[in-house]
Amino acid sequence: MLTISVLYQSYNQAEYIKESLEAILNQKYKAFEIIIIDDCSSDNSKDILNKYELNHKNIKLIINKTNKGTASSSNYGIENAKGDLIYFAAADDRVEENLFEEANNAFINNKNLGLFSAKINTIDSKGNLIVNENKNYKSLNKINILSPEESLLRLSKNNFWITGQTCVWKRELLIKNKLKFNEQYKHYMDHFLIVNIILSYDSAILNKTLASWRLLNNSYSSKNFRFFNAIPAFELFSKDLYESLKNKNLNTKKLEKCVHSYFNNLYLINLKKHLESKNFNFFGSVYD
């Protein structure tokens, strides 16, 4: 059996801690350890988290004296967790009770697996459903094991299907490949690790909803995506991604196409979002 470490990040999300943390504690397949990092919250998050640490032996609480950012906390988890697998959790998201069970089964049955992912719902601040369908899953079976070559083909067709809220990683592969989160990539810093892993190892994609992403105006994603400010981050992300992958045993032309089309897809989708926020809508449904 494989052990799972959870790296749970908290920053001024006190109202959601009980819901999100209870969902992790109530998993059918229990986490070996839950490392909670509170990134210098100014609300009562620390009081709530202290009580959980006192009542659960597998919880370790770390309270930052200064705000260090998401990347710092995530990298601490990669370096210090003890589990075979690692899951990065956010205080404002919510997982289904069988996420870890499904992930463990996938890794047990596929020895070359680097990453497990599944579908998500998008919910609002009160937990109401906003979106429950991802078009990229329509052609998938219930469980799909994709080789790096198959993942490369999907990415080269602008078909990104990985949802960070359900990603469970083989921790040793993150360490072996020296993969870390980089705050400079802003909104897409988890994509750098995801693409590196799925183009180096098999990935399991489950066509089943196993988590909910809460869309908030003050969330990390919202705060760190401002379209024109994000352009330098996109460019750095694209350059670094190609450099990190060019020595892999992948078709060079396909890799170049993958990186360029992947970058362009992110750019165009978010340009569309930016323009729609300004009441422009001349793209229609071309990039939906």
Image (tube, helix red, strand yellow):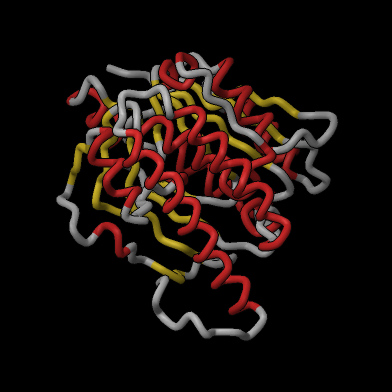
Image quadrant where one finds the C terminus: bottom left
Image quadrant where one finds the N terminus: top left
Residue 164 higher or lower than 4, as above or below? below
**Residue 186 location (% of width, % of height):** 65, 46
Instruction: Residue at 37% x, 39% y: name it.
Output: 255
Point out the residue furthest to the front here.
Answer: 253
Instruction: Residue at 50% x, 65% y: name it.
Output: 269
Instruction: Residue at 57% x, 62% y: name it.
Output: 215
Q: Is residue 221 found left or right of 89 in the rendered image?
A: right
**Residue 226 location (% of width, % of height):** 70, 61
Residue 190 higher or lower than 121, as above or below? above
**Residue 167 location (% of width, % of height):** 41, 39
Residue 205 higher or lower than 147, as above or below? below
Label count reads 0
Q: Quadrant of residue 145?
A: top left
Q: Foreground residue, 135 or 47?
A: 135
Instruction: Residue at 39% x, 30% y: name it.
Output: 197
Q: Is residue 201 found left or right of 37 in the rendered image?
A: left
Does residue 17 appear in the picture of this structure? no
**Residue 98 location (% of width, % of height):** 31, 41
Q: Quadrant of residue 52?
A: top right
Does residue 70 appear in the picture of this structure? yes
